[in-house]
Amino acid sequence: MPPRGMGKRGGSMDEDRRGATAQVPGEFVHRADPADIFPTGWTQLRENRFSVSARWPAAHPFFSPVAGDRHDPILVAETIRQATMLVAHAELGVPVDDQFVMWDLHFTADPEALAVNGLPSDVTVDIVFSGLEGRRGRLRNLPTTVRLTRGSRPLATGGGLAGYTSALAYRRLRGERMAALGRPVPLIPGVPPHLVGRQRPQDVVLGPGAWAGQWQLRIDTGHAILFRRQNDHVPGMTLIEAARQAATMAVGGGAFLPTGVDISFDRYAELDSPCWIEAEVLAGSDPSTTAVRVTGRQEGLPVFTCTLTSPSPEPAVAGVGLDSRLAS
């Protein structure tokens, strides 16, 4: 177990390693590479409230800046996910071999607080687990409310609902689907990276669909970030990235900055059947924001629904092309 010693209870980095490598065990956040472990410590404030310190990377192969000079807002979702699992495993008695299930996740971030430069990379996550009082025995569902700050500046608010299933119960639940573990999945061609706000072809998670506004989920089980370990289904964070990329395509590419994300999951996305992603831009009364609803369906059944909101691009300026306007 990691050392305690912050506040009432908690763990932290060794003083002589501060700023280098997080001491938070990878199994607590379901990440193997230290570069992908964002929490650096935690403190229990009350019975159901914790403070998790985190550090966002200055450079990362996947969570790279977007819209020119903003941290990728999906870092907010990943930080919420890791902070929730860290506290669940380290403080709430959830075994590390339990299966983590994300039922829904939402956040709203301040686009100015996402600026890469001028603000510290240290992030504090204040996380409250509602409904823990009076529980006895094994935890099953963990509703959370979170608030993120950078320095003294509010960064984002959000929350979600996570569940945990024992390894034995999960094997019974999934049955023959467990045979998908380690099985190769054919990698379909992806859309051009720049159309989905990506630079590297390997980070594209959408392939062509049957019509405009539809894409097939592109599954690369060898992707170190999106498939952090062998899995029998598509991870939730991969589906969030698919929603972001689909929303970017729906608005015509360019600088889509999803400062608002609200996603709910209906069922597992399986590896052996095409998952179809569809997106539509929602009509709204606020011209300063653009909202896109993205849905995933597999074998005719809903997999997830996600609404993403971004600040709208600046109005066109005479003599300035679309590409230069979006890059400003």
Image (cartoon, grey):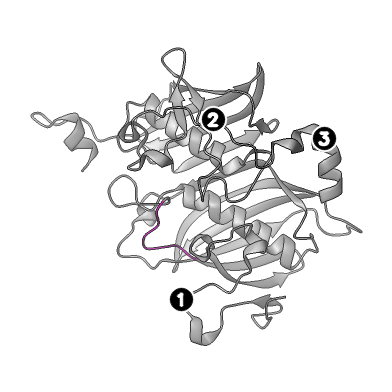
Residue lying at the far left in this picture: please name it: 319
Which label belongs to residue 175?
A: 3
Q: Is residue 51 above or below residue 62?
A: below
Amino acid at dot 3? Gly
Front residue of this view, candidates 112 and 326: 326
Q: Which circle, 3 or 1, is nearer the viewer?
A: 3
Asked which quadrant contains residue 44, the reply is bottom right
Alpha carbons under labels 2 and 1: distance apart? 38 Å
Please, what is the dominant secondary structure of the magenta stretch?
Answer: loop
**Residue of label 1:** 20
Instruction: Using a 10 Å C-alpha cutoff, classify the residue at mark 2 as few (fewer than 14 neighbours), some (14 to 19) or many (20 or more).
Output: few
SS of the residue at dot 3? Answer: helix
Instruction: Using a 10 Å C-alpha cutoff, classify the residue at mark 3 as few (fewer than 14 neighbours), some (14 to 19) or many (20 or more).
Output: few
Counting the numbered discs, the total is 3
**Residue of label 2:** 186
Amino acid at dot 2? Pro
